[in-house]
Structures are given as C-alpha cells and as structure tokens.
Amino acid sequence: MARQGSWLWDRGIVPHVPVWDKSKQTGGRFTKEDFVFDRDRNVYICPAGAELAHSGIVDQGRILPYRASKNDCSTCALRPQCTTAPARKVSRDIDEDVRDQVRALANTEAFQVSRRERKKVEMRFAHMKRIHKLDRLRPRGLSGAKDEVLLTATAQNLRRLAKLLCRARPVSPPYVQHRRAVA
C-alpha cells in the first residue's frame, strides 16, 4: 500500500485505502505507538528513554528494523512490559510517512463515505465471481475477457433491474362494502 500511496500523493490524489497495520497485536506489551520516532536523528525512543537505532539493513526490501541495545534492555525496569527477547525491535516501513498520512485520513467523513461506496462495488464483483462463475475466464485474449466481463455485468444489471421492477408495491386495501345489519 505504501508504494501505491506514495505514487498517489505525488500526483495529488488522496488515497482512501485502509492501511493494514498489525503493530497493535503485541499480547499486552508495548506497541509501536508507545515508541516515539525522532525524525531528525532517525531513531525511536522507547518508553524508558533508550534509543532504538537503525542498522542500515533493509528487511524484505521495504522494512527498516530499529533495535535497542541488549545492555539497555537487560537493565530496564519496563522490560516485562516491552519484550521477552534479549532486545526490543521496532519495524518501520520505508514509506511510513505516507502510511501515517493515509491513517490520518481514515477518521475523515470523506473516507467513511468512500468506504461505504467501495463496499457496494466490491460486493458486485464478489457476486460476479461467486454466482456468475467469473472466477476464471474462459475465452482467450483481452477482447474475450472484456466480452465475458461485459456480458456478466449486463446479466447482473438485468437481474437487479428485474428485482427492482418486481418489488412488491404497497397496494391500497380493496374497496370493502359494508352491509347494514338488519335487525
């Protein structure tokens, strides 16, 4: 997401895409948010005040690991709340600044609106895959794939149209003639 988010921001497009973040799943220990990133010195500061430095190595082509020294962690009073490893490690994505900007967008009204609209569209594609068996395209080539997707979308729209037209309309109660009771 970060690469695409950076590409979108560079072109003035606001990305309304959720950021997958698993840093909060720590089993009751300190999370990444408990560590403060010092942008000027390129270090994280732990809750006890120790620095976590970047070694210069890039994991998996995108992740920058920041590690505390074993000496700092071994004498730290907060270690039981922080880690069970010899030293604490915090990972940072190369495009973490972009991820932070996108995370901040998640609380806006525009993001919530686009999220609701995205669910509607994604539900249509899921329906095409599941009901209309569009999980695998049969014709070969781009034009064959285009034809099959258009045909499936047409069938899906016709089905929706039929449902909308056949929806039970509220009918006024039939005219009931009341007879007078003869006494």
Image (tube, rainbow, N blue to C red):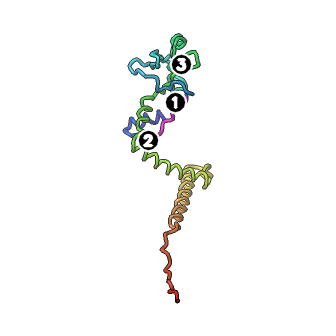
User: Farthest left residue?
Assistant: 12
Check disc 3 and report its element: helix, strand or loop.
Answer: loop
Q: Is 20 included in the stretch rendered in magenta? A: yes
Say which label, 1 or 2, has the lower sequence index: 2
Compared with residue 69, is residue 158 higher up or lower down, i.e. above or below?
below
Compared with residue 79, is residue 180 higher up or lower down, i.e. above or below?
below
What's the residue type where badge 1 is placed?
Answer: Lys
Q: Is 26 included in the stretch rendered in magenta? A: no
Asked if residue 139 can be seen in this view, the reply is no
What's drawn in magenta, residue-wise?
17-25
User: Farthest bottom residue?
Assistant: 182
Q: CA distance from mark 1 to mark 2?
A: 21 Å
**Badge 2 local density, few (<14 within 10 Å), some, or many (20+)?**
some
Q: Point out the frontmost of discs 2 and 3.
A: 3
Magenta region, main secondary structure: loop
Numbered badge on residue 88: 3
Compared with residue 21, is residue 30 higher up or lower down, i.e. above or below?
above
Q: Residue 18 versus residue 15: which sits nearer the camera?
A: 18
Numbered badge on residue 148: none
Residue 57: x and y, percent? 52, 19
Q: CA distance from mark 2 to mark 3?
A: 33 Å
Image side of residue 87 versus residue 102, left or right: right
Do the residues under discs 1 and 3 have CB atoms within 8 angstroms?
no
Q: Residue 48 versus residue 133: which sits nearer the camera?
A: 48
Q: Point out the frontmost of discs 1 and 2.
A: 1
Q: CA distance from mark 1 to mark 3?
A: 15 Å
What's the residue type where badge 2 is placed?
Answer: His
* Disc 2 target residue: 16
Numbered badge on residue 24: 1
Check disc 1 and report its element: helix, strand or loop.
Answer: loop
